[in-house]
Image (cartoon, grey):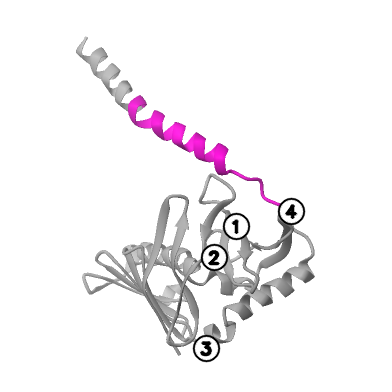
Amino acid sequence: MKLKKTLKITAGILVFLTLPSLLFFGYLYIRYDEDLPVGSNPEQADVLAHKMLNALDYEAFQNTNYIEWLFKRRRFYKWQKDKQTCVVNWKDYKVDINLRDYALSKVYIHNFSVEGEIAKELIDKAVKYFNNDSFWLVAPYKVFDEGTKRSIVTQEDGSQALMITYTSGGTTPGDTYLWHLDDTGKPTSFQMWVSTLPIGGLEASWTDWTTTDSGANLPTFHKLLFLGIELNEVKGKQ
């Protein structure tokens, strides 16, 4: 009898915990999920992509050799773009990633150098962190990266949005983003169809910009549904 009672209590707790979550997810799915739109006119898309880069001063970004930022107050980055290295700090770990050759990266725990399988696992984790967290910082500048496809999606109001699909590279190739731009070409938001999210078409803002010492325009905050993605201590230098 005690076992039966325990199972009933456990089942009740599981239902109590999971049912609201399932209902909430169902609401979000019905409310926000969108099919991936069909893009066209790749030549016109390239023109729109260049307009976006011009609005953000792409040349200033290209001349920015050093960028640092704090992602969601969890991970701190020091990215030496010209040397293709990035130091990632989180918890008690520090990984100095060699972006040309991950095997040459260096790993530290409590400032002590480590090697072997533990180092490899931490390098893999740091690379995934970097790919994700840097994308939230510099995604507009990656529209002409190798392996990208660009197309135009005409919105209901007649405006044009820029669709970018990453066919290779990064941690999750195949992801697609639909950029919404203002009249000058500057991004205001994008919608995402990505493998890490079960709902397609979720929209995140790109409105809270800062101009770094190098002249590069970088974001400091994104609003995603009722959540906020903070990028603090954003700095850029030549």
Say what secondary structure mark 1 lies in. Answer: loop
Tell me how many marks there are. 4
Asked if marks 1 and 2 touch (Cβ < 8 Å), the reply is yes
x, y percentage for residue 231?
Answer: 39, 68
Asked if marks 1 and 3 touch (Cβ < 8 Å), the reply is no
Residue at left 73%, top 72%?
A: 46
Asked if marks 3 and 4 touch (Cβ < 8 Å), the reply is no
x, y percentage for residue 56?
Answer: 57, 78
Q: State which mark lies toward you, 1 or 3.
A: 3
Disc 3 target residue: 63
x, y percentage for residue 59?
Answer: 58, 86
How many angstroms separate mark 1 from mark 3 (CA)?
28 Å
Disc 1 target residue: 175
Q: Is residue 230 above or below residue 233?
A: above
Confirm whether the magenta stretch covers residue 33. yes
Pointer 3 local density, CA inside 10 Å: few below 14, some 14–19, many at least 20 = some
Disc 2 target residue: 170
Say what secondary structure mark 4 lies in. Answer: loop
Task: Tell me the quarter of the image containing the C terminus.
Answer: bottom left
